[in-house]
Image: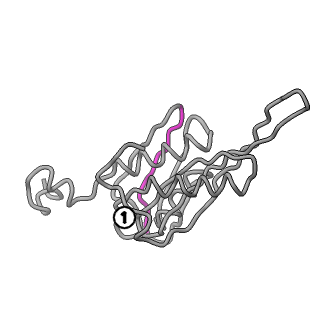
Amino acid sequence: MAANVNTVKASEIELKEKVVTINRVAKVVKGGRRFSFAALVVVGDGNGVAGYGLGKANEVTDAIQKGIEDAKKNLVKVPIIKNTIPHPIIGKFGAAKVMLKPATPGTGVIAGGGARAVLEAIGIENVLAKSQGSNNPGNVVRATFDALLRMRDAKAVAEQRGVNLTKVFNG
């Protein structure tokens, strides 16, 4: 993730971890196969802050720990309005596309795999998501973060345009 104005320090908040996927990788050597593991982890505080990280090691637990440390270095703040997202958006990364739409209260998180882990870690309670293209968990997580980072709330739009908040909604 690129440096962003939405970055947050991990030491300031209590984070929950969610392992998205663990990938076993085999390296063939003279004596047989050597296995190592790659873990994709999403961390979040459930209040608009989340990050993802990839950890690689010879043991699963070590890979998960490295992933958590990496995720804590890449925390970002996302706008949440009434437990959902401000507007529909499509995020892209590689061949993966993730479409996110705001939902009415009581809908829940309707998303699969990597997108669900990200949305739950952030604390969004009502959202519709559809993963299109690649179903690679790493790319889906990155595409979801791409969509969330490009989202703006009404205050940010009003500030950028140099008008008051009512003008943003009424034209």
- Give the residue displayed 58% in from the left and 47% down from the top: 54
Where does residue 137 sit, x and y in percent of width and height? 61, 44
- Taking depth in this image into account, of 88 and 16 the one nearest to the observer is 16
Where does residue 151 sit, x and y in percent of width and height? 33, 51
* Image quadrant where residue 82 sits: bottom left
- Taking depth in this image into account, of 25 and 164 the one nearest to the observer is 25
Q: Which residue is mark 1?
A: 80
32 vs 108: above or below? above
- Give the residue displayed 44% in from the left and 64% down from the top: 10
Where does residue 126 sit, x and y in percent of width and height? 47, 65
- Taking depth in this image into account, of 10 and 100 the one nearest to the observer is 10
Q: Of all residues shown, which one is farthest toward the left? A: 163
Q: Is residue 19 magenta?
A: no
- Give the residue displayed 66% in from the left and 49% down from the top: 39
Q: Is residue 89 found left or right of 129 in the rendered image? A: left
* Image quadrant where residue 85 sits: bottom left
67 vs 108: above or below? above
Circle 1: element type: loop
Give the total of numbered labels: 1
Q: Is residue 103 magenta?
A: yes
Q: Of all residues shown, which one is farthest toward the front? A: 30
Which portion, as a residue range, is magenta? 95-104
The residue type indicated by label 1 comes to Ile
